[in-house]
Each structure stands twice: as structure tokens, then as C-alpha cells.
Amino acid sequence: MAIARRRKFVHAQTAWMLAAALTLALLDVLTLELFFVLSLLGFLIVVEFTAPFSVTPKWRMRLKWLILAGLVSFGYVAIRRVLSILPIEVF
């Protein structure tokens, strides 16, 4: 039972990432930053939609570290993007 839920989680995340990559490619805006942001968004959505109601398996408890790493990376990407937009006189 736990393996089936874990497999559904992996399939949902893989489908989200493939859909994001295909959509970005079709729109001709595929960059690593955009793909990362959409993948992180999808990961957070999949984590919430597949959360169990009563008992949390051990593998799901380890997801918080992936979420933390993803949010830190997102902060880095966002800061880099903002700094590239701002003029140099601001610093």
C-alpha cells in the first residue's frame, strides 16, 4: 500500500515536470530557472494533494528537507533575477 502511494507521488511529479517542460518549450520560453520554479510549484502542489489524513509515512517526513532546499534555491534564483533587473546605481 505504501509503495503504491509513493509510486503515485512519483508519477504525479514526473507528469507535472514533463508537462511544464513541454509547455515552456511550446511557448519558446524554456529556461532552467523557469523550469525549476514550475517544478518546485508542482512539487508543493503534489505534496499537498497526496498528503495522508491520519498517519504520515517516514518517506513523507523526509520531504520537508526537499521542500526547504527547494525554497532556499528559489530564494537564490529570485534574488539573482531581481539583482539582474535593478540598475547598478542602486547598490
Image (cartoon, rainbow, N blue to C red):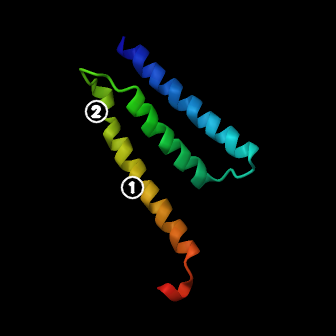
Indicate left or right for 69 with 36 as reference: left
In the rendered image, the residue lying farthest to the left is 55
Quarter containing the N terminus: top left
In x, y percent, where is residue 37? 53, 49
Q: Quadrant of residue 18?
A: top right
Q: 86 or 7: which is nearer to us?
A: 86
Residue shown at 57% from the left, 73% from the top: 84
Q: Mark number for residue 61? A: 2
Indicate left or right for 86 with 29 as reference: left
Q: 71 or 86: which is nearer to us?
A: 86
Circle 2: residue type: Met
Residue at disc 2, secondary structure: helix
Residue 20 in the image: above or below residue 76: above
Q: Quadrant of residue 6?
A: top left
In x, y percent, where is residue 49? 41, 28
- For label 1, the residue is 72
In x, y percent, where is residue 79? 47, 67
Residue shown at 59% from the left, 52% from the top: 34
Residue shown at 55% from the left, 30% from the top: 14
Dot 1: within a 10 Å radius of its alpha carbon, few (fewer than 14), some, or many (20 or more) residues?
Answer: few
| Distance between mark 2 and mark 1 Cα atoms | 18 Å
Q: Mark number for residue 47? A: none
In the rendered image, the residue lying farthest to the bottom is 89
In the rendered image, the residue lying farthest to the top is 1
